[in-house]
Image (cartoon, rainbow, N blue to C red):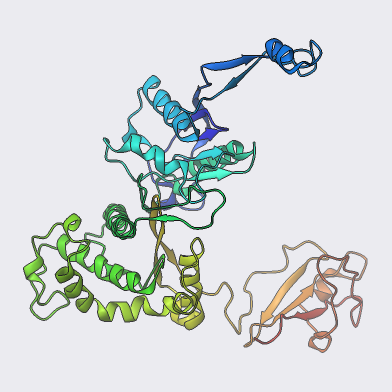
Amino acid sequence: MFTEKFHCVQLRPTSGYTTMPGSLPVNAEACWPKDVGIVALEIYFPSQYVDQAELEKFDGVDAGKYTIGLGQSKMGFCSDREDINSLCLTVVQKLMERNSLSYNCIGRLEVGTETIIDKSKSVKTVLMQLFEESGNTDVEGIDTTNACYGGTAALFNAINWVESSSWDGLRGTHMQHAYDFYKPDMVSEYPMVDGKLSIQCYLSALDRCYTVYRKKIRAQWQKEGIDKDFTLNDFGFMIFHSPYCKLVQKSVARLLLNDFLNDQTSINENGIYSGLEAFRDVKLEDTYFDRDVEKAFMKASAELFNQKTKASLLVSNQNGNMYTPSVYGCLASLLAQYSPQQLAGQRIGVFSYGSGFAATLYSIKVSQDATPANYIPKSSVDDLYEGTWYLVRVDEKHRRTYARRPVLGDGPLEAGVDVVHMGLAHEHIPSPAKKVPRIPGKADSEAVAVSLSNGEH
């Protein structure tokens, strides 16, 4: 994590846990990281400076204008040999070396800065050069930018990550330094693009993210006594960052290729791998532009694409690449074409990619509706405070009816706690943001029922 342009801090909890937090029960709060904070800090400043007393003379201003009026003795500056990327490279490497840290032990690196030398490519991706020898590319975090506050926001993000289930979460991330698509011209919206390299980066990131994700899922399953490999079939749906729709279809084929090469027992004449044995010994890194491999696996994955991914391309097909919101436009497209009942319980795989480059593959589990239709709560209202409004029922159109426990002085509590008068169900209730007056009931000792609905959609 960086503060401003040249501070670097290492975060970790001073008391840890041995179990992944995401697998803990709700009541196991004592096992979460505590006292998360800064255990090491590195600061770097330029080797050149301007003496402010000399600058007062040079500028022809009164003596003391800078040294007394601003309280400034010297002012550091960078030559054209240094920029935000080089400053951050220096401070990260010094922090790692001074604290004898291995690049393999880093799970998140976030940059806080206000200096932008590229409108697309992040400083973080440049820093990934330091991780190349270690082979660790599963490093989350990216740049956080807002004037002098970027460093604080980055610090908070890093602390929140350590304290959350994402600390050792089931996400597969790959970040690497490349100039595939970037925007170094501050006065132009047009990028510099290496089309072939961009496709290679996208597909290689997909390979790496999927590999890391599968390993994490398999490790989690083994803890739960499940001995099997994760495959594309374990996703109910699979959505992707969509620069153009054909690349998404090729990406589904790419995941099937990964599954095929990972499954050494997949000799199956009639199954999904039928006719693919000729590709058993190919290496992933040699197949980015192999037309034979691409054609064979696109054909083999055609039905998977139709079942799991095609619906997500509605907006992409009609609108084109939306850049940052692209993958979430795919999610919206998917949600718009299936009912809640069809989606409930499904695991949606999500592959997010940004050039330069950074990528993560994670999954979303679609839960059941929080409250089903035709529902009557089971909990007793006896434990509620007097004057508390409570849910009475949800009807077949998900319209909710509420009642209020009487306030002391309105009459005997026991006389009205469970009494609901549906005849008052359509009485107008002001917005919760405004002061809500007590609505008189039919009798002071009776509870009042009110139906609140956002309409029939």
Whether residue 17 is visible: yes
Q: Nearer the viewer, residue 50 or 450?
A: 50
Q: Nearer the viewer, residue 280 or 83?
A: 83
In the rendered image, residue 73, in percent from the top left (x then y), is placed at: 68, 12
Q: Quadrant of the C terminus?
A: bottom right
Whether residue 224 is visible: no
Q: Is residue 385 left or right of residue 457?
A: right
Q: Is residue 126 left or right of residue 27?
A: left
In the picture, residue 398 is in which quadrant? bottom right
In the rendered image, residue 303, in percent from the top left (x then y), is placed at: 27, 81
In the rendered image, residue 68, in percent from the top left (x then y), is placed at: 78, 13
The residue at 27%/53% (across/down) is 215
Q: Is residue 359 left or right of residue 219?
A: right
Q: Is residue 104 above or below residue 433?
A: above
Q: Nearer the viewer, residue 39 or 16?
A: 39
Q: Is residue 108 above or below residue 411?
A: above
Q: Is residue 288 left or right of residue 281?
A: right
The residue at 78%/61% (across/down) is 385
Number of marks in the rendered image: 0
In the rendered image, residue 277, in percent from the top left (x then y), is placed at: 7, 70
